[in-house]
Amino acid sequence: MNSQLISYLFKTRAIRVCPKENPFWYTSGKIGPYYINTHFLFGSEEEANLLLKRIDTLKENKEACTGELYKTLMDQYRNNPIYKGTIDALTAYINAHLAPSAIDFVSGGERRDWIFSLPIAHHLGKPHITLFKDMDAVVYENGSSHATGDLDGASVLHVADLITSASSYTRAWVPIISRLGAQMKQSLSVVDRLQGGAEALGRLKVESHALISVDKSVFEEAFRKQYIDEGQLKMVLDYMEDPDGSMRQFLKEHPDFLSDALNSGGKPAERAKLLIENEFYKLNR
């Protein structure tokens, strides 16, 4: 367990746990006790969100995007200890476990992956393949970007902020790398949510690695470090044991939670309607 990285995740609220009687509404219409926004490890929530806005502007010019973003990231690396510590932890993991000499390229996918993949390419001295959601790609090396061409069987390490079900890999990242004539052999994520992503990558013949796997030990460590209290820890552990069952029990014990959301308007009301329409928790049975 990387205790320092766990501290970074909770200090920046990259992992945020709800108060024990007020779970978060997820976009699906389900509820749960925590959010993960790994890109906050850029330094803070505010800095990370400003960076994403900058990326949205930069990526309008694909040739110039990577070089400009690289400058911003390396400046932050030099000045922010949390971001530097995260990048250094990724680099140390690669050096210890992934045989850097066998890696020809580092890739990262639009947008959040780039926050981590570009500095890693720099530290390893490897060209960076910047992958876009529209299935385009450019290579950044020696201070400039160029079209990819045929990569002639090159070995690629993909660096990501977070892996959940690996749908982005299946839909875009692995197919792009294959189309370029290369092979994505390994993926390294800062965080693995343990929701089937590693298994999905295995089916694509990609070896999956992560600095942090989000299991109960992460939250137990956060409790020991006093980032969360006992009530929050219990709610998270119950959720991990039985996500739907624990949230169904919560709603039965707190009937006002759903009615308050419906009456509040906005996104909470929209998500509460989804919960009811889809009968996620079978509250009437």
Image (cartoon, rainbow, N blue to C red):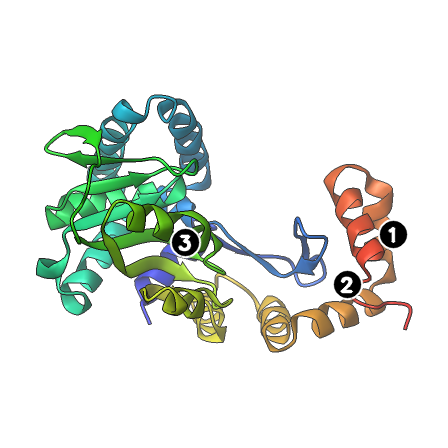
Quadrant showing the C terminus: bottom right
**Circle nearer the viewer, 3 or 1:** 3
Task: Give the residue drawn at x 22%, y 36%.
Answer: 148
Q: Which mark is residue 76?
A: none
Left-right relation of 282 to 111: right
Residue at the far right: name it. 284
Position of residue 130 measured from the top left corner of the image (x, y, whole percent): 29, 38
Report, in whole angstroms, how far the alpha carbon at label 3 lies from the one at label 2: 28 Å
Q: Amino acid at mark 1?
A: Ser
**Circle nearer the viewer, 2 or 1:** 2
Q: Amino acid at mark 2?
A: Phe
Whether residue 148 is situated above or below residue 91 in the rendered picture:
above
Q: Residue beneath label 3, please?
A: 169
- Callouts 3 and 1 close, C-beta under 8 Å: no
Q: Which mark is residue 259?
A: 1
Report, in whole angstroms, how far the alpha carbon at label 3 lies from the one at label 1: 39 Å
- Callouts 2 and 1 close, C-beta under 8 Å: no
Q: Which mark is residue 280?
A: 2
The answer to which of 217 and 231 lies nearer the viewer is 217
Report, in whole angstroms, how far the alpha carbon at label 2 lies from the one at label 1: 16 Å
Left-right relation of 77 to 234: left
Position of residue 88 measured from the top left corner of the image (x, y, whole percent): 21, 54
Q: Amino acid at mark 3?
A: Tyr
Residue 143 quadrant:
top left
Position of residue 160 measured from the top left corner of the image (x, y, whole percent): 35, 52
